[in-house]
């Protein structure tokens, strides 16, 4: 049996250090907003290349808090528009709509699976206040063209870096340090995964970081004094210490993922199976390894591999604009046409990839 992802095996790679760190926290008796959080936030900001890192409860909260902070800062108003890739996990769009903002969905390129930057500028209106890019599957989505568009129109660039810890863009900067702010998820299956939920916001904007931190702590910057109507969204000490251990090995673990990916690129040859364009190694950390299966055979290949003990997953079989929760949304008009996004939803299949997978398993 080759599981799609064995979290047990991934954790075991650094198991001794993780157990030692957890024991230290348990025995220390301090479980929230302590030194482990401070240390991880410092180390992660240094790793990403930003001035500030604010831990929070999960990746959805990280993105939601960014937009909420911009509302509190007066940068955005309810009803403003945020341009966002149409082919993303629904959390990216939930963070926008939860704040009373309007998502404007942009198609991806079929060969890269990332947002088509040629389509962004035409979608900008007077109400556009941000572009959100998603480094989907661990692939760098940033282009200089996107940055120039944001600067030209004086709009924010927000990164969804939930799937791309350690990735770099073409100029060498880490994703998560490219835009005005970035949301990160530390869900256990991520390249940098906790032993439960966790998330963070990274930014160079001191006001944004301070506002996010307050909003995530019930809206409080001082005990029992509440400037905002916030929420409880904090990274606990246990998860922070686990993440701090794993962060030391992230680049090496990503390198092991790349070895697996190179094998797939070299050996997958089938007329119905297409691979996305190969990116330079530093621009892809292979959170997932997606292939596109044509001829209506995606589900058949999934079943074929499962029957032979190879775990695969479809990311994502229903596009966000086709989900029931958005069926009556004002922005999701019946004539909304997103054929490439819908094609990806019907053809994408992710193969097993992780730093714990063995050469025997991939062969």
Image (cartoon, grey):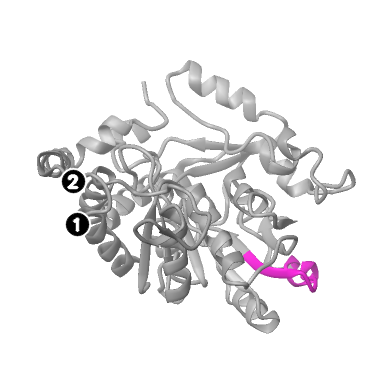
At 63% from the left and 23% from the top, the residue drawn is 300
Cβ–Cβ below 8 Å for labels 1 and 2? yes
Q: Which residues are the magenta region?
A: 119-131
Does the magenta portion include 70?
no
Element under disc 1:
helix
At 41% from the left and 54% from the top, the residue drawn is 217
The numbered mark, 1 or 2, whose residue comes first in the sequence reads 2
- Between 272 and 319, the one lying in front of the other is 319
Image coords of residue 175 (percent x, y): 45, 65
Gap in Å between the C-alphas at discs 1 and 2? 9 Å
Q: Which residue is mark 2?
A: 30
- Between 239 and 309, the one lying in front of the other is 239
Specify the label residue 35 is tagged with. Answer: 1
What is the crowding at mark 2: few (fewer than 14 residues within 10 Å), some, or many (at least 20)? some
What is the crowding at mark 1: few (fewer than 14 residues within 10 Å), some, or many (at least 20)? some
250 lies above or below 291 = below
Does the magenta portion include 128?
yes
323 lies above or below 35 = above
| Image quadrant in which the N terminus is located | top left
- Between 342 and 75, the one lying in front of the other is 75
The part of the image, by quadrant, that contains residue 34 is: bottom left
Answer with left or right where residue 345 lies relative to residue 47. right
Image coords of residue 150 (percent x, y): 64, 76
Q: Is residue 344 visible?
A: yes
Element under disc 2:
loop
The part of the image, by quadrant, that contains residue 309 is: top left
The mark lying in front, picked from 1 and 2, is 2
Q: Is residue 205 visible?
A: no
């Amino acid at each position: 049996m080759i599981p799609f992802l064995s979290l047990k095996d991934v954790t075991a790679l650094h198991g001794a250090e993780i157990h030692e760190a957890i024991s230290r926290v348990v025995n220390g008796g301090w479980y929230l907003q302590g030194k482990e959080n401070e240390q991880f936030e410092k180390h992660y900001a240094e790793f990403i290349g930003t001035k500030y890192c604010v831990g929070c409860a999960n990746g959805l909260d990280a993105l939601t808090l960014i937009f909420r902070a911009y509302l509190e800062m007066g940068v955005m108003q309810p009803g403003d528009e945020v341009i966002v890739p149409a082919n993303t996990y629904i959390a990216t769009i939930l963070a926008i709509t939860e704040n009373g903002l309007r998502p404007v969905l942009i198609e991806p390129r079929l060969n890269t699976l990332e947002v088509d930057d040629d389509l962004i500028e035409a979608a900008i209106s007077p109400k556009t206040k941000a572009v959100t890019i998603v480094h989907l599957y661990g692939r760098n989505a940033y282009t200089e063209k996107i940055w120039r568009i944001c600067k030209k129109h004086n709009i924010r660039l927000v990164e969804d870096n939930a799937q791309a810890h350690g990735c770099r863009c073409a100029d060498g900067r880490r994703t998560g340090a490219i835009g005005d702010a970035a949301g990160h998820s530390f869900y256990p299956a991520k390249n940098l995964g906790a032993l439960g939920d966790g998330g963070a916001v990274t930014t160079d904007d001191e006001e944004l970081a301070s506002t996010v931190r307050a909003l995530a702590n019930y809206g409080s910057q001082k005990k029992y004094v509440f400037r905002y109507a916030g929420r409880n969204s904090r990274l606990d000490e246990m998860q922070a210490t686990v993440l701090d251990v794993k962060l030391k090995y992230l680049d090496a673990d990503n390198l092991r993922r790349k070895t697996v990916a190179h094998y797939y690129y070299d050996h997958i040859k089938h007329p119905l199976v297409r691979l996305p364009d190969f990116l330079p190694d530093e621009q892809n950390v292979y959170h997932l390894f997606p292939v596109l299966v044509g001829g209506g055979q995606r589900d058949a290949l999934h079943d074929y591999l499962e029957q032979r003990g190879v775990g695969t997953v479809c990311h994502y079989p229903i596009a966000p604009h086709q989900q029931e929760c958005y069926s009556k949304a004002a922005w999701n008009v019946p004539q909304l046409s997103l054929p490439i996004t819908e094609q990806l939803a019907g053809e994408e299949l992710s193969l097993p990839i992780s730093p714990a997978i063995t050469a025997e398993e991939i062969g």
